[in-house]
Amino acid sequence: KLKKPFITTGFPFMHFAVVAIVGAVVIYAYFNKKHGRNYTFGYVVLKHNTSVDVKLNYDIRSNTKPQTVQLRNTMNAGEGDTVKVRVEKGTFSIRGSRPVEIIGVEWTY
């Protein structure tokens, strides 16, 4: 006696593709949770009245691209100081994270 297949679509092995895609998303979420962070470090290039220009390098953990951004100087950072910058990540961070604000000034000796 011949049994009819359970899946009768044009792509009968679709469940393999679905399992692979779900697995990739789960692995991405796991590594992002374990190794990712919502801040990066940069250094102050130029100080204005209420803002500073911060130079950021590429950071794989926070997924920031190399750029110079102008941020409000809430921590009274001076030129040459290393600052900690909070970043906002988008969905899957395809275009990189966006720097938002300075959350600390790092002391270097």
Image (cartoon, rainbow, N blue to C red):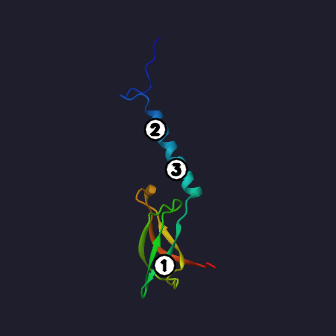
Say which mark, if any, is on residue 44: 1
Which label number is shown at residue 89?
none
Which one is earlier in the sequence, the residue at label 3 or at label 1? 3
Disc 3 marks a residue whose amino acid type is Tyr
In the rendered image, residue 31, in percent from the top left (x then y), is placed at 56, 52
Q: Which mark's residue is nearer the viewer, 3 or 2?
A: 3
Above or below residue 36? Residue 15 is: above
Does residue 12 sit above or below 17 in this rendering? Answer: above
- Quick one: which residue is furthest to the top in this view? 1
Q: Quadrant of the C terminus?
A: bottom right
Q: Secondary structure at mark 1?
A: strand
Tag shown at residue 28: 3
Going by the numbered disc 1, the residue's amino acid type is: Val
Residue in the image at 47% along x and 11% along y: 1
Mark-to-mark CA distance, 3 and 2: 15 Å
Residue kind at label 2, given as amino acid type: Val
> In front here: 8 or 57?
57
Residue at 44% across / 25% down in the picture?
A: 6
**Image-quadrant location for residue 50:** bottom left
Q: In x, y percent, where is residue 63?
A: 48, 60
Q: Earlier in the sequence, mark 3 or mark 2?
A: 2
Which residue extends farthest left?
10
Marker disc for residue 18: 2
| Residue furthest to the right | 109
